[in-house]
Image: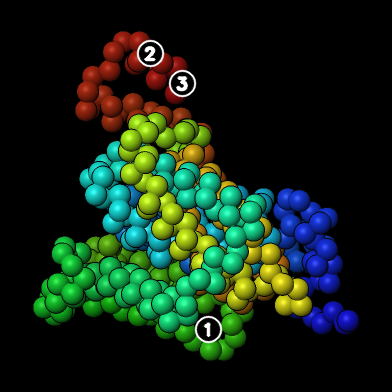
Amino acid sequence: MANTPGSPDPRFARANNAWPLFRSLDSYRPRFLTRDLVAGLTLAAIAIPEQMATARLGGFSPEIGFFAFLAGSLAFAFFGNNRFLSCGADSTITPIFAGGLILLAASGSADYAVLAAALALMVGVVLVAGGIFRLGWIADLLSIPVTIGFLAGISAHILISQLPGVLGLPSPDGPMLQRVAILAGHVNEANPITLFIGLGVLAVIAVSERINARIPGALIGLILATAAVALMGLESRGVTVLGAVFGALPTLAIPDIPAGRLARLVPLSLIIATVVMVQTAATTRSFPSDPNEPPDVDRDFVGVGAGSILSGLIGAFPVNASPPRTAIVSETSGRSQLTGLVAAAPRFCAMFPRPRSAASCCSSRSESSVSARPSRSTDSRLANSC
């Protein structure tokens, strides 16, 4: 069979036996690296704001979303099979498990975060077991109308939750319809600049896809919007910016939770694991590594499950396969799981502590002397380091 340009290498069919890890790198060619870099940067433009928004949707700080994306991308690259699939924080499951966790702990509290990490471990174990025991058929139990209705409801929830940011309005509380009514009553107070930026980025993405699906419209829109805010000083005109996202390197730790509380997480973990299985199977089948070979859904269960386990160990929450991000990788000609690693690399590098220059050290010393007089030994250490 001829190998047409852009089609996967025929040897991908033998990858399942030849490559126990990093299967997407089987038959990799140096010329694929440029495609993976472009696809990875485009994915980063989508994933960075999305992961922050998803984390906030679940009641977590923005950097926890990055941790989840890092864990999902790294673990799936190791253990997954599909070369396009993007794994990380997902807005489909986040509202579900957040609604369950809030019954056990206050949203945003330390206890809430520990429960989310434990839930991620439990979901990951179920998924890995499902892959090992070849339970891919579970994804066929839900009918297409039920799945479409479920995803449509989640999409409406996400859209409404992001409207305040696009309009430049405070986020209202209450049920979904009540929030819509509140936003509609204050739409005349929307910030026109914020609205223009949001609609402008959306237009850039839509036009880019219309011209050529391989044009990284999201990356272009992000760069243009960032440049506009920085060069025109739009923050002073009411445009809210993220600012500094604090976060050190994550550390591995098993959540310390009494057995009684773990038992209360079992039903929720099974629900989340089932939804993840359905979405992972749908994503894998929609974007197969080789159109001429059946997708290895069970192996992808293992990859996503490993991502959820790693996410729980570093203090994040359950992860899932993302159809929109996977489509971005496929449409921008990504060739392997290197795209996910490239997308996660900028934030991972930002976690490392930067060496302090003499100027910044002395500046820190001056600021500390204004707020509180340091001890003699502390003052001596600062002076020596400067």
Residue beneath the point at 62% across and 73% down: 285
What number is the disc on residue 360? none
**Dot 1 alpha-carbon crowd within 10 angstroms: few under 14, some 14 to 19, many 20 or more:** some
Q: What residue would you read off at disc 1?
A: 208
What number is the disc on residue 380? 2
Q: Nearer the viewer, residue 102 or 328?
A: 102
Q: Is residue 155 visible?
A: no
**Helix, strand or loop at disc 1?**
helix
Residue beneath the point at 81% across and 56% down: 17
Report whether 300 appears left or right of 348.
right
Q: What residue would you read off at disc 3?
A: 385
Q: Does label 2 or label 3 sit earlier along the sequence?
A: 2
**Helix, strand or loop at disc 3?**
helix
Residue 156 appears in which quarter of the rendering? bottom left
Q: Give the image location of residue 205, x and y in percent.
A: 47, 80
Q: Does label 2 or label 1 sit earlier along the sequence?
A: 1
Task: Check contact, mark 2 vs mark 1: CB within 8 A.
Answer: no
Nearest to viewer (mark 2 / mark 1) = 1
Q: Amino acid at mark 1?
A: Ser
**Dot 3 alpha-carbon crowd within 10 angstroms: few under 14, some 14 to 19, many 20 or more:** few
Q: Give the image location of residue 143, x and y in percent.
A: 47, 78
Q: Amino acid at mark 3?
A: Ser
Q: Nearer the viewer, residue 139 or 359?
A: 139
Residue beneath the point at 47% across and 61% down: 274
Q: Does label 1 or label 3 sit earlier along the sequence?
A: 1
Report whether 2 appears left or right of 347.
right
